Image (cartoon, rainbow, N blue to C red):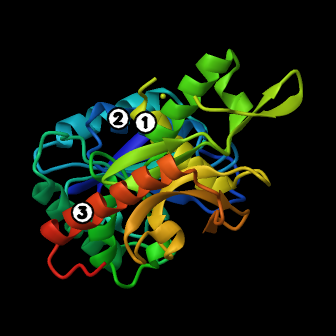
């Protein structure tokens, strides 16, 4: 694959274009990955470029963003992606400033790989991300906030992006969801894709819930009665893929989304709920699930902990 490199209008962004002579029938999708030199980001970038997330017929422009001084790492990742000759990857934008990184993007994976950093540090970063989304991104952008305290960070991001619909900024709880699926499937001696409708509740801490789950055994759908592959990049890709492509009828997944007050979770905070997603990329919280007393107690405790952390970390939170 031939490629060319040129400076963009902004002096701290580089654009690398993959040569392609075929006719383009679909608009290019601009996808941002932050902390792009981290291992998780590199895996996400590869999966996105392969078509795993947004579909195998969707051409892409990949935006790779990291801190100033990381251009060498960004160039290395870009060369790896171009050398892989992914047919959907039309262009790579390497950026160390937010204006170039967030400009006109359709989707974003906002990563925070430093699990040991104080919560205040991550909140400030995601407030900055929110302001950049508000100023530079498409108003229809779909965002998943990843990493420790993802729900708290998503809330901070939402508050800093008033022109972006709060429903378009979500938090990753799919890692815990996938862990629950894997552990349940192991106990049942079935493949994880045979298990459905597990729920992971929570914001600050998570509560896995299998009481509404079912599984297929010899083509028969059976209930899962009581009973979690740590793969952060796969979880983020699963989250965005289901958001972009929808979930099957009667099936839900766990996503950290803005609460509508369901299950006693205060309106406006970001919390992991079971959601169904339609073909128009619109999610809805699955309501009226009957929680058993033990699960309800744990969910209520998790809710209180989430509100307490929000109120201590972000001034002006009312919940």
Q: Is 132 drawn above or below residue 300 in the view shown?
A: below
Secondary structure beneath label 1: helix
Name the residue rendered at 26%, 69% in the picture: 156
Residue 69 visible from this viewpoint: yes
Secondary structure beneath label 2: helix
Q: Earlier in the sequence, mark 3 or mark 1?
A: 3
Q: Is 38 drawn above or below residue 297 in the view shown?
A: above
- Between 57 and 150, the one lying in front of the other is 150
Q: Residue 119's x, y, as percent?
A: 15, 54
Q: Which of marks 1 and 2 is nearer the N terminus?
A: 2
Q: Is 97 drawn above or below residue 179 in the view shown?
A: below
- What separation in Å lies between label 2 and label 3 (alpha carbons)? 18 Å
Q: Residues within 10 Å of mark 2 (few under 14, many from 20)?
A: some
Q: How crowded is mark 3: few (under 14 residues within 10 Å), some or many (20 or more)?
A: many
Left/right of residue 218 with respect to residue 130 in the rendered view: right
Q: Mark 2 = which residue?
A: 40
Q: Mark 1 = which residue?
A: 233
Left/right of residue 65 with respect to residue 294 in the rendered view: left
Q: Earlier in the sequence, mark 2 or mark 3?
A: 2
Q: Mark 3 = which residue?
A: 126
Residue 2 visible from this viewpoint: no
């Amino acid at each position: 694959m031939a490629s060319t490199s040129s400076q963009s209008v902004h002096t701290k962004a580089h654009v690398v274009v993959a040569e392609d002579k075929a006719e383009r029938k679909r608009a290019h999708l601009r996808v941002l990955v932050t902390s792009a030199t981290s291992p998780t980001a590199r895996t996400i970038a590869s999966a996105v470029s392969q078509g795993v997330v947004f579909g195998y017929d969707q051409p892409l422009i990949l935006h790779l963003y990291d801190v100033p001084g990381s251009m060498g790492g960004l160039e290395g990742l870009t060369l790896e992606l171009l050398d892989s000759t992914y047919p959907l990857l039309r262009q790579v934008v390497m950026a160390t400033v937010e204006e170039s990184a967030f400009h006109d993007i359709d989707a974003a994976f906002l990563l925070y790989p430093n699990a040991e950093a104080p919560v205040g540090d991550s909140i400030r970063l995601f407030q900055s991300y929110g302001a950049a989304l508000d100023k530079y991104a498409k108003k229809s952008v779909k965002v998943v906030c990843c990493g420790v305290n993802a729900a708290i960070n998503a809330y901070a991001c939402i508050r800093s992006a008033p022109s972006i619909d709060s429903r378009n900024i979500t938090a990753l709880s799919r890692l815990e969801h996938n862990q629950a699926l894997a552990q349940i499937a192991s106990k049942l001696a079935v493949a994880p894709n045979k298990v459905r409708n597990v729920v992971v509740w929570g914001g600050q801490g998570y509560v896995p819930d299998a009481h509404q789950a079912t599984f297929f055994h010899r083509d028969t759908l059976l209930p899962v009665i009581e009973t979690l592959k740590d793969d952060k990049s796969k979880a983020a890709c699963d989250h965005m893929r289901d958001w972009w492509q929808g979930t099957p009828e009667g099936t839900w997944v766990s996503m950290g989304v803005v609460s509508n007050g369901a299950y006693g979770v205060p309106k406006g905070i970001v919390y992991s709920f079971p959601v169904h997603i339609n073909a128009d990329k619109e999610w809805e919280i699955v309501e009226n699930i009957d929680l058993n007393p033990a699960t309800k107690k744990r969910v209520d405790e998790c809710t209180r902990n989430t509100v307490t952390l929000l109120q201590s970390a972000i001034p002006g939170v009312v919940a």
